[in-house]
Image (cartoon, helix red, strand yellow):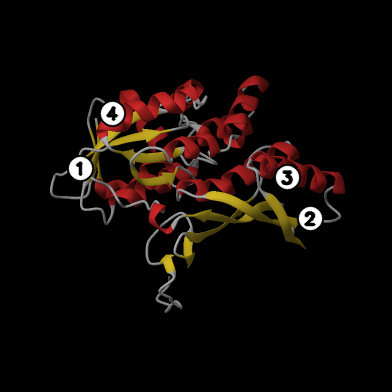
Amino acid sequence: MCGLKMPSSPQLLVGLEHADDAGVYQISEDLALIQTVDFFTPVVDDPYQFGQIAAANALSDVYAMGGVPKTALNLMGFPIGQMDISIFRKIIQGGLDKIREAGMVLVGGHSVEDKELKYGLSVTGFVHPKRVLVKRNLKPGQQLILTKPLGLGIVNTAVKAGLTTTELADQVSSIMAALNKDAAEVMAHFPVSACTDVTGFGFIGHLAEMVVGSGYSVEIDSDSLPLIHAAVEFAQMGLIPAGAYKNREFRKSMVDIASKVPREIVDILFDPQTSGGLLMAVDTSAAKGLLRSLTKKKVLSAAIVGRVVDRGKEKIWIQ
């Protein structure tokens, strides 16, 4: 990080040396702690929904590492004097409800006066040291499964522009507020070797973090991607968030896109997500069984979206 020398320890299983979703510190032979923190400014107008979404987003990093979240600390920046204190309470309530849904406890937190509203959580989870999932542990022939639909950033852009119905806005808020808990619980029973959650870097950006350092490439079937249907229409209209262009510029050198893939689908692939789904790599022999179990668990947008291949390089091929 910025050329600084970080403190190290033999117990630090996952640290800053790689772009993983959380840090992992081994406590004993059969227990390790997962630690992560995430907070951001509102992505929706409703304070209660914002609290839910921010909490779900923070918890997702623990699920992506193969762990179970246990405790949380609130983090809040609040513009006192500019907003009614009831907004503060509604945000906290949204977060608390998600913490309860996850089977966790809130152990404290910290708030500061800030000109810009911000909220999130610092989260601690448990995992067996031998069951930690990192991003880059791909294996040739594995299938890639995504558990939430893409297009959240594009639809949120349309919401801000006043171009959506209340029903669509609520639908997208529900997707963002949905925990990755059920997907993680199912995943734990299958031979998944690598996982991440899809958030601000978009589908391609987070997939690239799995590819870099793995020694392998991935092929993505664009027709198999779970999408929010309205996002396709808004992308065709050019309602693309600025972050999507930044994501594309950053990863364009390692992405090969077939000419048949529509422009709007390409835009969705780079679209920054908030509290998106898990992207996991599973042995081919178990992929369909994992997908069936996810569907049975009501993870209804789960889909097999591609595969890991050995092409002697680290690239993403979009077909």
Q: Earlier in the sequence, mark 1 or mark 4?
A: 1
Label 4: how many Cα within 10 Å (few below 14, some 14–19, many 20+): some
Amino acid on which the number 2 mark rests in the picture: Pro
Residue marked by disc 3: 96
Residue marked by disc 2: 79
**Marks 2 and 1, how far apart in space?**
50 Å
Residue 199 placed where, x, y %? Answer: 48, 44
Q: Earlier in the sequence, mark 2 or mark 3?
A: 2
**Marks 4 and 3, how far apart in space?**
38 Å
**Marks 3 and 1, how far apart in space?**
41 Å
Residue marked by disc 1: 140
Residue 19 placed where, x, y %? Answer: 40, 58
Label 3: how many Cα within 10 Å (few below 14, some 14–19, many 20+): many
**Marks 1 and 4, how far apart in space?**
16 Å
Amino acid on which the number 3 mark rests in the picture: Leu
- Mark 2 or mark 3, whichever is nearer to me: 3
| Tag 4 secondary structure | loop
* Quadrant the N terminus occupies: bottom left
Residue marked by disc 4: 221
Residue 178 placed where, x, y %? Answer: 59, 34
